[in-house]
Image: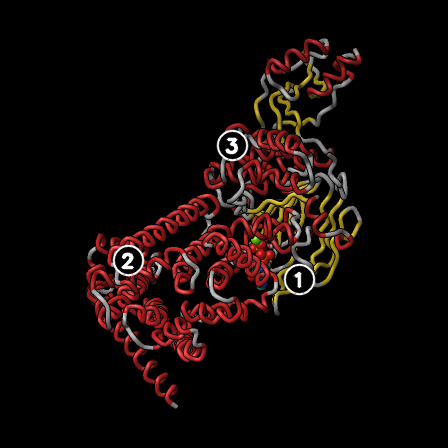
């Protein structure tokens, strides 16, 4: 569930980032729109998706994606737009086409920032997926809810600690990937 | 009619819960920030811890409060506070410290005391970051105040979860819509204030 | 893999009535300039005088408001701008190596985009790095930030040469380097330039660099071209005070009209001269052993002239005598005035003359060294 959500978030988020970069007049409305989605409480978003997707994993995945789009799309857009002029100029002067400039220069140089966005998305996705337990998406969230309802301290503590550990671990892995990319591509940022 | 009153009451309860927690969070964060200003070790510890905790899902934080403190209004306030405390501290700290070092040097050079440097150089420079932290915390508090209904915090969250267990759509919507309205209102009004507060020279 | 070339060689680059304005301000104003095939033309002038703007109209990074740029008589607007740029090497002061690509990938980027295969690219990159004095095996796999400024600039040069373009545009390529390194790179660049024999437009703000490298120098000021000419022309007949100020002739060449050939000649080493009766074989042997590019041919009393290595090789293969390939040299006495001597060298298209004292060869006058010794 986590991986599926993350996969689609990255796919769609990066696509939106590239799209808004290529069509700047859409950038403000699209990113502001995603920003509004972002401020809606996660429980509320999940609940609103219930009539459309029923209960279970689908609304959880969709909610995760909706949350994760903003950081990924925004960072992709910012990264693509802010590559230092000198690299763009030299690439153009060497005779790269606009397309080649985008994919050979701008995109790779934006990777550290995009990875930063994905790292935030990892945290968001983890949060929403856990919450999914409340609407029958199963997983660790369900265990937590059971624990609370049965007032079972052991279950709550163990599951809570495990969720926390998993989240910190995933965030750490994403962080390592991010800083590796920074070291590799990010001498300018 | 009955439901309107119920919504109003729940909304007030929700707001009271969320913003009591935010206020306490803000009050607690001030001494911690001042401490970390003078202690680099503590500062880096707080930053690390805050980054770690931010990765933990809210639901897990809320749940873990139960075995530690119990259920009810106070544990709910504490859960929310724990969650908003770290972004508040982190943003303020970043704002205070991302000041051009030469600015600090020249301020000291013209004879400002340590306190005056904070008051007249660091603080004005940190406003946008502090403000962003408050905005983030306010929206976060609204969001977690829904979850804390699970541990007896009451408010709009209770309506939503009751609705969910009874498959009562009206009740679900009655809880959800005000929560979203609050979120949108916060986002909108904070953006407006942010625009006023940003110094002219930083606006593009 | 063949490169689709727009032109094999450049015979001329012509800028005609070029004007470019930013707002109300002229960046270049009615510029007329012709760059001849095979020459290195220097653009020099104060910062903001329009050099970069002029340079960039050539590869269409900037489209002028009016006027035309043509290469070999063809308007550059007729070419696809991407194609055009792939046929023109471009080097800039801040180099702009792409930080995410290894050195080999930076140099080979265009080759890859042109569809060369891995092996061809690697071979070409090796050759190019060797040419700019970077041992390929040590540098191919590094990233730009692991290189020093001078090394990065060499890579920038290699990258510009990847497609073997007949024309280079260079915008203060050595401007950011410290003076010592700059001199070294200038020397190496000078060698490469001679080897490749390409047409080059080169911007600098350093008059010494201009004199060292330039065949001709174009001086710009306030968006306008003030004077174009060889270093000698600028020094001896500046059109305005500004030109004299830039070439600094007032201070440095104040004494030039009082100088005599004897003051500036280089002593002649007798043992480096060849006898007219020598066989081509032994002449070649001597020259190779001493590392001479050229040598003077002279008998006991009379002087025949000079030969270069190439001539001697020719003589050997054709089996003719040394004196048949010997070229006559302008002769000066050591009290000829320097100005007169330089004018004579120039009119005869020679780069050196022999100086006689009491009818005995005493020294050599090299026109380019005269200027270099003076600055
Ligand atoms: N993109 C631009 N926008 C506005 N003005 C420019 C731009 N590029 C150059 N200029 C102006 O045009 C003039 C010539 O610039 P440039 O050709 O870069 O000079 P140089 O290379 O001789 O230092 C300068 O006054 C500069 O400020
Ligand atoms: Mg310039």
Where in the figure is residue C225, as x and y percent of width and height?
65, 55
Whether residue B189 is visible to the viewer of this picture, yes or no, is no
Vertical relation: A82 (above or below) A47: above
Q: Residue at 39% across / 59% down in the picture?
A: A130
Q: Residue at 70% across / 50% down in the picture?
A: C82
In the image, ligand 1 is in what quadrant? bottom right
Q: Secondary structure at mark 3?
A: helix
Marks 3 and 2, how far apart at CA? 57 Å
Closest to the observer, B203 or B152: B152
Q: Is residue C289 left or right of residue C345?
A: left
Q: Residues within 10 Å of mark 2 (few under 14, many from 20)?
A: many
Chain letter of mark 2 equals A
The residue identified by callout 3 is C139
Vertical relation: B102 (above or below) C273: below
Q: Is residue B126 left or right of residue C1?
A: left
Closest to the observer, A65 or A145: A145
- Asked if the residue under mark 2 is in contact with the one under mark 3, i.e. CB atoms within 8 Å, the reply is no
Q: Secondary structure at mark 2?
A: helix
Disc 1 residue: CB within 8 Å of ligand 1: yes
Residue C20: which disc?
1
């Amino acid at each position: 569930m986590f991986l599926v959500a993350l996969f689609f978030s990255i796919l769609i988020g990066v696509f939106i980032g590239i799209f808004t970069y290529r069509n700047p007049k859409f950038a403000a409305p699209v990113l502001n729109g995603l920003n509004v989605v972002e401020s809606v409480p996660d429980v509320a978003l999940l609940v609103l998706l219930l009539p459309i997707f029923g209960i279970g994993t689908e609304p959880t995945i969709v909610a995760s994606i909706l949350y994760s789009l903003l950081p990924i799309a925004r960072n992709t857009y910012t990264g693509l737009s802010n590559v230092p002029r000198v690299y763009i100029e030299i690439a153009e002067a060497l005779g790269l086409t606009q397309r080649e400039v985008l994919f050979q220069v701008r995109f790779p140089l934006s990777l550290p920032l995009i990875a930063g966005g994905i790292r935030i998305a990892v945290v968001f996705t983890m949060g929403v997926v856990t919450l999914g337990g409340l609407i029958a998406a199963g997983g660790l969230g369900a265990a937590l809810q059971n624990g609370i309802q049965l007032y079972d301290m052991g279950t709550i503590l163990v599951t809570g600690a495990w969720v926390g550990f998993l989240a910190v671990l995933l965030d750490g892995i994403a962080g390592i990937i991010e800083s590796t990319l920074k070291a590799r591509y990010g001498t300018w940022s | 009619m009955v439901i309107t009153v119920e919504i109003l009451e729940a909304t007030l309860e929700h707001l009271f819960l969320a913003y009591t927690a935010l206020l306490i969070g803000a009050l607690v964060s001030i001494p911690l920030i001042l401490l970390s200003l003078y202690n680099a070790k503590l500062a880096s510890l707080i930053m690390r811890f805050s980054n770690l905790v931010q990765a933990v899902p809210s639901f897990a934080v809320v749940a873990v409060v139960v075995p530690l403190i119990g259920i009810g209004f106070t544990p709910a306030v504490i859960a929310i506070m724990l969650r908003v405390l770290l972004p508040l501290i982190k943003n303020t700290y970043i704002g205070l410290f991302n000041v051009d070092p030469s600015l600090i040097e020249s301020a000291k050079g013209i004879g400002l005391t340590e306190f005056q440097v904070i008051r007249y150089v660091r603080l004005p420079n940190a406003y946008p970051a502090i403000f962003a932290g408050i905005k983030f915390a306010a929206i976060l508090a609204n969001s977690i105040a829904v979850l804390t209904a699970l541990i007896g915090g009451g408010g709009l969250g209770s309506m939503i979860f009751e609705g969910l267990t009874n498959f009562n759509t009206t009740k679900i919507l009655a809880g959800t819509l005000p929560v979203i309205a609050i979120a949108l209102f916060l986002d909108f009004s904070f953006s407006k204030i942010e625009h006023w507060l940003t110094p002219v020279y930083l606006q593009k | 893999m063949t490169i689709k070339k727009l032109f094999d060689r450049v015979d001329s680059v012509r800028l005609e009535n070029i004007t470019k304005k930013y707002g109300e301000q002229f960046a270049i104003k009615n510029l007329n300039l012709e760059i001849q095939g095979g020459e290195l033309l220097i653009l020099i002038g104060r910062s903001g005088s329009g050099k970069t703007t002029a340079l960039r109209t050539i590869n269409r990074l900037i489209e002028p408001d009016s006027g035309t740029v043509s290469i070999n008589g063809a308007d550059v607007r007729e070419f696809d701008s991407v194609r055009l740029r792939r046929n023109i090497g471009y080097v800039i002061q801040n180099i702009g190596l792409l930080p995410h690509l290894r050195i080999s990938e930076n140099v080979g980027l265009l080759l890859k985009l042109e569809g060369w295969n891995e092996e061809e690219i690697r071979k070409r990159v090796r050759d190019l790095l060797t040419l700019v004095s970077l041992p390929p095996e040590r540098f191919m796999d590094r990233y730009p930030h692991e290189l020093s400024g001078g090394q990065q600039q060499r890579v920038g040069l290699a990258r510009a040469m990847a497609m073997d373009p007949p024309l280079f545009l260079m915008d203060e390529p050595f401007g950011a380097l410290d003076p010592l390194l700059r001199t070294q790179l200038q020397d190496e660049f000078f060698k490469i330039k001679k080897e490749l024999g390409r047409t080059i437009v080169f911007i600098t703000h350093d008059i010494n660099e201009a004199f060292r490298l330039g065949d001709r120098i174009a001086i710009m000021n306030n968006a306008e071209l003030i004077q174009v000419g060889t270093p000698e022309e600028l020094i001896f007949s500046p059109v305005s005070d500004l030109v004299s100020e830039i070439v600094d002739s007032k201070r440095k060449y104040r004494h030039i009209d009082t100088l005599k050939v004897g003051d500036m000649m280089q002593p002649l080493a007798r043992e480096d001269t060849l006898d007219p009766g020598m066989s081509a074989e032994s002449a070649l042997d001597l020259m190779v052993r001493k590392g001479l590019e050229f040598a003077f041919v002279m008998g006991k009393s009379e002087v025949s002239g000079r030969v270069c290595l190439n001539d001697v090789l020719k003589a050997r293969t054709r089996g003719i005598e040394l004196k048949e390939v010997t070229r006559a040299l302008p002769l000066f006495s050591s009290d000829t005035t320097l100005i007169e001597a330089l004018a004579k060298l120039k009119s005869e298209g020679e780069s050196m003359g022999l100086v006689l004292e009491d009818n005995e060869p005493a020294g050599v006058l090299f026109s380019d060294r005269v200027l270099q010794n003076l600055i």
